[in-house]
Amino acid sequence: MHQLDVKNAFLHGTLTETVYCSQPAGFVDSSRPDLVCWLNKSLYGLKQAPRAWYSRFSTFLQTLGFTEAKSDTSLFIYHHGGETTYLLLYVDDIVLTAYSESLLQRIIATLQKEFAMKDLGLLHHFLDVIVEPRPSGLFLHQRQFTCEFWSEQG
């Protein structure tokens, strides 16, 4: 299982509706200060930004052969021959697991060509859940949110 982080995810989104904004401070045309900017790409702070990013990312994954899981639109599945890959997206955080290391690396390289992202390596935490490999599988916990109480008697 691998972990990736998309850099400036919301800036990758393409707007499908007309959105205008005021001229940014420091870039106001003094001869026409009442003009507005017509946005082509998404910006942080726009209510459309999360949807535009998700649409852009999911459309790209579909061109690679991934399909959205029916049970969860954050989960994408790729089947090709006997190989399967699962990709879980939460805003700009990705968990990726694949049938083989070579398939995993090919998908990571393809994603990195399309989107600026940081490869965080093996999955160690996701959404405040700590992931620890064990011989029998993975141990998931949130120990950082628990309190330990002990008495003075030991």
Image (cartoon, rainbow, N blue to C red):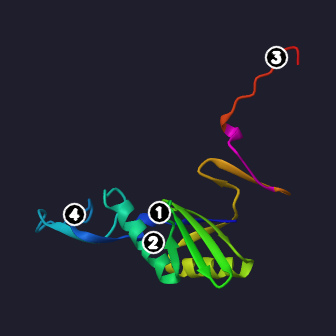
Q: Earlier in the sequence, mark 1 or mark 4?
A: 4
Q: Residue at x 39, y 70 (%)?
A: 55
Alpha-carbon distance for marks 4 and 3? 62 Å
Of marks 3 and 1, the one in the foreground: 1
Residue type at tag 3: Ser
Of marks 3 and 2, the one in the foreground: 2
Q: Earlier in the sequence, mark 4 or mark 3?
A: 4
- In the rendered image, residue 76, in percent from the top left (x then y), is placed at 54, 69
- Span colored in magenta: 137-144
- Reading the image, the residue beneath label 3 is 151
Determine the secondary structure under disc 4. Answer: loop
Q: Residue at x 71, y 75 (%)?
A: 99
Of marks 1 and 2, the one in the foreground: 1
Q: Residue 10 appears in which quarter of the rendering?
A: bottom left
- Determine which of the numbered discs, if any, sits on residue 23 in the image: 4
- Seen from the viewer's position, the closer of residues 26 and 94 is 94
Residue type at tag 4: Gln
Q: Residue at x 61, y 69 (%)?
A: 86
- Reading the image, the residue beneath label 1 is 73
Instruction: Please say whether residue 2 is one of the residues in the magenta stretch.
Output: no
Q: Residue 134 appears in which quarter of the rendering?
A: bottom right
Alpha-carbon distance for marks 1 and 4? 36 Å
Near mark 1 (Cα within 10 A), the count class, few <14, some 14-19 or many ≥20, is few
Tell me if label 1 and label 2 are in contact, CB under 8 Å: yes
- Reading the image, the residue beneath label 2 is 58
Q: Earlier in the sequence, mark 1 or mark 2?
A: 2
Near mark 3 (Cα within 10 A), the count class, few <14, some 14-19 or many ≥20, is few
Tell me if label 4 and label 2 are in contact, CB under 8 Å: no
